[in-house]
Amino acid sequence: MDKFPRTVVGGVSVSRMIIGTNWFLGWSHCTAAKDAFIQQEIADPKRLADIIEVFFRAGVDTIMGLINSPVLPEAIREAENRTGVKAIVVSTPSFPTTKRTPTDGWDLGEVERILDAQVECGATFCLPHTSTTDLMIDKCTREIRQFDVLCRMIRERGMIPGLSTHVPESIVYADETGLDVETYISIYNLMGFLMPLEVDWTNRIIHGAQKPVMTIKPFAAGQVRPFQGLAFSWTTLRDIDMVTVGTMAPREAAEVIEISLDILSRRQTTVALQETRSKQSVKSEG
């Protein structure tokens, strides 16, 4: 299998496919029952290491999420030990906010504690989560308030700053104000799932972004099949941008990697198709 293509973010070489972790940790965006199933059956360090190992061996060495969750650090270390691959970690911590935070600023002691925990877990990148970023957007002044402080404190700890957002204005305002970020996380999928602007508008914003964009939710939380979702993402993004993919099994990881490499190489994918009785009439008898 070909090694996965790479891009550069903040001077660091990263794989253009990023390992997503919502499906590792129980955030399905589907139902409470599915969340519970993931937490009970999937969120085990060894099982997660089995999945991460498949990505690592294919050259997909970048992983994103709440990195200091109970199971992820152990799973990543296990996959690193098996493969000799060092993970590139994109951490997305949340920071506490109150109604006074936009004007008075952060609880700096708490911010320091949270950031130090990211360093301890081996984060290369630190992108405050959408649950923090999007609360601080000021559409009147066209800025993300108090984020210069967060970015400075991230840099001071040797991590590379970015921002995670569900609001496309974040990218526009970060660029307009010269905010010290090297990348952005943005939702992007063909259904427009969880996207506040139309897909074509979001595409235009991503293409106009001054830094590479890490896109998420290409399968709209399982509502889009992998072939369609990946074909859309890989063919409509820039060569510098990335696609974050969540899976729940090693074979799923192998499939999304193979499909992606075929799409990027403009060749017909040969990944095994699912079989149902209704497909018999279209299969060749030869």
Image (cartoon, grey):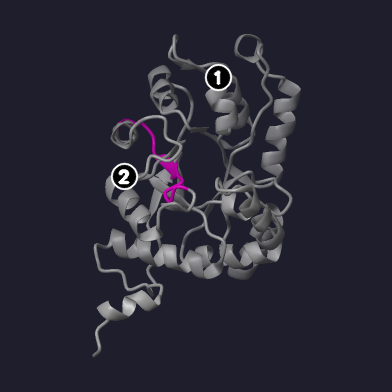
Is label 1 in a helix, a strand or a loop?
Answer: helix
In the foreground, 49 or 201: 201
The image quarter in which residue 248 lies? bottom right
Residue at the farthest bottom position: 286
Q: Is residue 206 visible?
A: yes
Mark 1 Cα-neighbour bin, 10 Å: few <14, some 14–19, many ≥20 = some
**Residue 67 x, y percent position in the rendering:** 65, 46
Q: Is residue 108 left or right of residue 257?
A: right
Q: Quadrant of the C terminus?
A: bottom left
Q: Earlier in the sequence, mark 1 or mark 2?
A: 1
Q: Quadrant of the N terminus?
A: bottom left
Q: How many numbered markers are drawn?
A: 2
**Residue 52 x, y percent position in the rendering:** 57, 62
Any magenta on residue 210? yes
**Disc 1 target residue:** 136
Q: Is residue 226 left or right of residue 53?
A: left
Q: Residue at x 58, y 58 (%)?
A: 86
Q: Is residue 25 visible?
A: no
Q: Residue at x 28, y 50 (%)?
A: 235
Q: Amino acid at mark 2?
A: Leu
CA gap between label 1 and label 2 equals: 27 Å
- Vertical order, 141 against 264 (above or below): above
Q: Residue at x 60, y 13 (%)?
A: 102
Mark 2 Cα-neighbour bin, 10 Å: few <14, some 14–19, many ≥20 = some
Q: Which residues are magenta?
A: 208-220
What's the magenta bit mostly, secondary-structure-wise?
Answer: loop
In the foreground, 204 or 180: 204
In the foreground, 279 or 232: 279
Q: Residue at x 63, y 62 (%)?
A: 48
* Residue 207 badge: none
**Disc 2 target residue:** 237
